[in-house]
Amino acid sequence: MTQGYGPEFGQQGQQPQWGQNGQPPSPAQQPQWGHPSPAPLPGGYPGSAGHGAMGTGSQYGLGDGVNWRRVKLLGLILLIGSALLLLVRLGMNLASFIGADELASSSTSGEMGALGVGTGLAAIVLFLANLVLSLAMLVLAVMAAVMGRGRARTGGIMVAVTIPVSVALYWIVSIIVAILLLATGMADSGTGELSGTGYRISAVVDALRALLMVAIIALGSYFVHSTAAKKLSA
């Protein structure tokens, strides 16, 4: 009895089956071995779609390469900074308004009471806080403008531009107010010192300027935060 040798000769010595006309079977007719290859997924290779959905879908936008989670955080910090900036700037104007009479009398007598000293120190502290806060928000706004897209970038540019514009507008408004106060007799034409009423008017006008500037800063900050939030929820 003849034993078979592997798959080439079959079992029990049987010869392999040949095709018609004595020709060997074509590769398409030969038995297929192994498991079929898995069909490629939308990512281009097995598992790529799952990696994209779980790895970057919640953090980056669809194809824009923006870290919207970080942009959203920048927008939130800018919104908080806008509220703090409003409090600081209004606090500076309030200190000037309360101590207006003390400031006016000290300019002529050279002496300042307890109220004038207190409001003066408060104004200095608030001025330093305003400077530090403005610089920090300027840096964050530039980061948001560089990292963001669309309205987020527009909002970052709005904040970054408004901060130096606010400083320039302060000096322009101060000069205009000083001219008007000199014309109305609320400021000494020789020394330029303001009266108590003059200090109060100047404080109110500057508070209105601060409200306008901070409103623009808050709007830009909202653009940054809301745009990032929409991208993350899409």
Image (tube, rainbow, N blue to C red):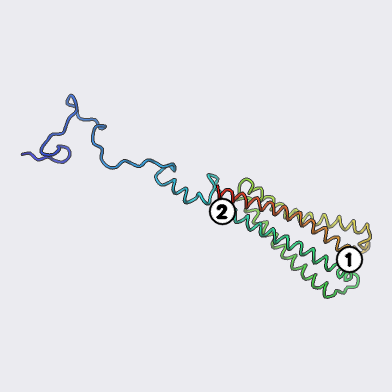
Expressed as whole percent of the image width and height from the top left, the position of residue 3 reads: 9, 40
Expressed as whole percent of the image width and height from the top left, the position of residue 44 reads: 42, 42
Which residue is rendered at x = 69% and y = 63% of the image? Answer: 132
Residue at far top of view: 21
Q: Nearer the viewer, residue 219 or 131?
A: 219
Q: Nearer the viewer, residue 74 or 131?
A: 74
First reached walking from the N terminus: tag 2 or tag 1? 2
Q: State the SS at label 1.
A: helix
Q: Amino acid at mark 1?
A: Gly
**Vertical side of 69 occupied by 190: above or below:** below
Expressed as whole percent of the image width and height from the top left, the position of residue 155 reads: 66, 50
Disc on res. 32: none
Q: Which residue is mark 1?
A: 196
Q: Quick one: label 2, few (<14), some, or many (20+) residues within 10 Å?
A: some
Q: Amino acid at mark 2?
A: Arg
Q: Which residue is mark 2?
A: 69
Q: State the SS at label 2.
A: helix
Gap in angstroms between the C-alphas marked 2 and 1: 50 Å
Looking at the rendered structure, the number of numbered marks drawn on it comes to: 2
Expressed as whole percent of the image width and height from the top left, the position of residue 157 reads: 67, 50
Q: Left or right? Give the position of 155 relative to 13.
A: right
Q: Nearer the viewer, residue 232 or 183?
A: 232
**Vertical side of 113 occupied by 161: above or below:** above
**Vertical side of 116 occupied by 171: above or below:** above
**Quarter of the image that includes the N terminus:** top left
Check whether the beta carbons of the residues at disc 2 and disc 1 lie within 8 A of each other: no
Q: Quick one: label 1, few (<14), some, or many (20+) residues within 10 Å?
A: many
Q: Left or right? Give the position of 46 relative to 199.
A: left
Which residue is rendered at x = 41% and y = 47% of the image? Answer: 47
Which residue is rendered at x = 90% and y = 62% of the image? Answer: 192
